[in-house]
Image (cartoon, helix red, strand yellow):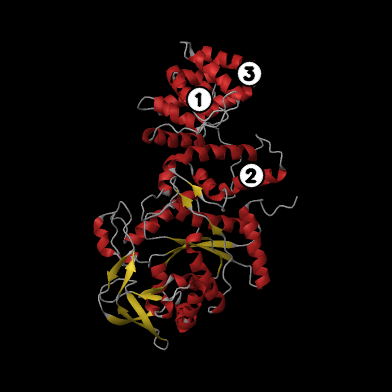
Amino acid sequence: MDVIGKGTWLDKVAYEIVERERRLGRSLKLIRVESGLGASGIPHLGSLGDAVRAYGIKLALENLGYRSELIAYSDDMDGLRKVPKGLPDWLHKYIAYPVSSIPDPFGCHESYGAHMSGMLIEALERLGIEFEFRSGRDSYRRGLLNRQIDAILRNADVIGEKIAEMLGQEKFEKVLPYFPVCERCGRIYLPHAYKYLPKEHKVLYRCEGSRIGGRWVEGCGYEGEVDVRKGQGKLSWKGEFAARWAALDIRFEAYGKDIADSVRVNDWISDNILGHPHPYHVRYEMFLDKSGRKLSKSVGNVLTPQAWLRYGSKESLLLLMFKRVAGTRSVSIDDVPKYMDEYDALEDVYFGRVKVENKAKEVKLKGLYEYVNLLKPPSSPAPHVPYRLLVQLFQMAPEDGFEFVVKRLKAYGMFREDERLLERMRLAMNWARDFQPPRSEPKALKPEEYEALKELLEFMKSGVSAEEIHNKAFEVARKSGMGPKAFFGLLYRIYLGSDRGPRFGSYIKDLGVERAVSILERYLKGPVAQPG
């Protein structure tokens, strides 16, 4: 069985990067990967995923024996196109201003852009992601991209023709692929750069106006010039990626399908104008909300990393990011319990508690577990207590519920003094305070499962004790032919969304027979397969 690295998609991509670099004849002493950090709105799981997955590629390259680093580049020279939902109305007067020159609406950073990229940086640091941060504004001011800007503007006619040929967009046949910041009104996008003076490194412009966020924004009419070496503007997206790749010697960058056209143009510019073979790419699909819409800063349907980490461990969030790269996925805060318990299942495979017959799959799952732990897996598994059980216990607990839950777990024989379990309890306590208990989606039942559950439900409704219900469950399991292991596993999936749980009678006693009956009744009204 030939396995690349640890058998995951990260390893496959890392291997292909190395092979491509060898074919290109470039040095392999340092392989840089890059991710852009959005600074125009509240960061969401999609924007976090760019950087986390790039870091995963960095780890995979290092696992293959190559030195690598992640550059996190903040697009803080971008102009504000829309005011994201939920932010103050006064921001509308800053439409088309670079986000690094807009006041922070929360009052804790030097600018709007610094606040937004700062939220993403804070989330990356909480996850243990290591990176070198680059600010777009500072990069332009320090002249990082000067050589590339000059080359792009000297070849603006050729680039404009190529963009028209590739995309049918004629805009850059009329204006330069460079956005000056107007010296009079301070806005970007509204000035149209119409001429480049290469000896003076200056761009001439008129502040005429532009369509931004679906509406026309009038310019101030000023005519002026900017020195492109002094950070008084920025390249358009149809060129800026290429400039960054060449200036920073980037060898890998992923991208979303929403910017595929820009990437095609930048690849051509990087290869043919800047003489830097474009980076190896992976195209990923978008994270969607449960209604099927793309997570968007302007729409306001963002799910922030900070929100996830209030309820879920960093490992659960890294699992969401590393599990796969292809295919769209709908995601919401309701997915936290699922990924918390899925991480436990992965840990069971890694430590040999659960056997996987397919060896290739076993290697892949163990490799995924190691990447989720950033190639520093723990030496022993954590105590596994189903997340949903913890939530239910905290919801039945008195106000100071932590000790109550510890006592109940001890009574179930499920408590061990371990910081990982205590942290999971704190996260579940947050969920219990903020939400209703998470429920797993009902799944179709086999006829024998349906009949067994129906018999147990009728018994539960007859005024019996929790201990009698426990004993009855054994009787029903044997009578149905399912056996106790399969039947109790079914019960735990219904009540806890997990294959395992505490002693069933003790759990029913704590949950309350009436509540247990209600949950099972609702479940049996779901899409079950009734006997014919």
Query: Around disc 2, counting alpha carbons within 10 Å, would you say few (fewer than 14), some (14 to 19), or many (20 or more)?
Result: many
Q: Is residue 373 visible?
A: no
Amino acid type at mark 3: Ser
- Residue 498 placement, left or right of 485: left
Q: Give yes or no for contact between labels 2 and 1 (Cβ–Cβ under 8 Å).
A: no
Of badges 3 and 2, the one in the foreground is 3
Please determine whether, in this image, residue 420 is positioned above or below residue 176: above
Answer with mark 2 or mark 1, whichever residue precedes in sequence: 2
Q: Residue under circle 3? A: 480
How many residues crowd mark 3 within 10 Å: few (<14), some (14–19), many (20+)? some
Q: Is residue 409 left or right of residue 297?
A: right
Q: Earlier in the sequence, mark 3 or mark 2?
A: 2
Residue 127, given in percent of the width and then of the height, sits at 48, 49
Helix, strand or loop for disc 1: helix
Which element type, helix, strand or loop, lies under badge 3? helix
Q: Is residue 193 above or below residue 303?
A: below
How many angstroms separate mark 2 from mark 1 (CA)?
33 Å
Residue type of the residue flagged with mark 2: Leu
Residue 13, percent from left and from top: 62, 59
| Foreground pick, 374 / 37 | 37
Of 194 and 338, nearer the camera is: 194
Label 2 or label 1, whichever lies nearer to me, is 1
- Marker disc for residue 524: 1
Which x, y percent locates residue 269? 52, 75
Expressed as whole percent of the image width and height from the top left, the position of residue 513 reads 45, 17
Name the residue beneath numbered marker 2. 365
Q: Secondary structure at mark 2?
A: helix
Query: In the image as oriented, which residue stretches furthest toward the bottom?
Result: 199
Image quadrant of residue 234? bottom left
The amino acid type found where label 1 is placed reads: Leu
